[in-house]
Amino acid sequence: MTKFIVTHRYGNEERWTDSRLIPQLVGELDDSEDVEHPCVAVADESGLALSAYVDGQVIYENVEDDESIPRCLVGITRRDQIRLLTALAEGRLDELEAENWWHWPPE
């Protein structure tokens, strides 16, 4: 089982092994209009992380590499946010790399 780290909307982190729980994590984005806590995230052990935002943005970055340039997608549905976070949690990096990422911040 692959372990991954999730960050809930209000900041608490947990280590998970079950990617089937990711829809519940993304569902936290619809809980309220709290603008102070606008995202949830999944990260792997190497530091690759995906953050999904209330407004449909997804940011993909390596939080352990200062040279890494964050990339983003905008206007992403909740279903696609779930698909992308699940791909990272399950180690399907080729699926993530196949997306049409923009450099962050978007121009």
Image (spheres, rainbow, N blue to C red):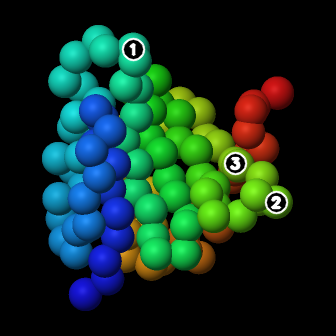
- Kindly identify which residue carries mark 3: 71
Q: Examine the rendering and report whether any part of residue 79 can be seen.
A: no
How far, Cα to Cα, is label 3 from label 2?
13 Å
Name the element at disc 2.
loop
Q: Where 92 sits versus 64, above or below?
A: below
Q: Mark 1 packing: few (<14 Cα in 10 Å), some, or many (20+)?
A: few
Q: Mark 1 or mark 3, which has the lower sequence index?
A: 1
Q: Mark 2 or mark 1, which has the lower sequence index?
A: 1
Q: Is residue 55 or residue 98 the one in the foreground?
A: 55
- Is residue 24 found left or right of 6 in the rendered image? left
Q: Nearer the viewer, mark 1 or mark 3?
A: 1
Q: Callout 1, which amino acid?
A: Val
Residues tagged 3 and 2 counted as in contact (Cβ below 8 A): no
Residue at 52% x, 58% y: name it. 49
Residue at 17% x, 47% y: name it. 24
Q: Callout 2, which amino acid?
A: Glu
Q: Examine the rendering and report whether any part of residue 97 can be seen.
A: yes
Say which quarter of the image contains residue 46.
Answer: bottom right
Q: Which mark is residue 35?
A: 1
Residue at 35% x, 63% y: name it. 5
Name the element at disc 3.
strand
- Residue 8's x, y, as percent? 28, 43
Q: Where 89 sits versus 85, above or below?
A: below
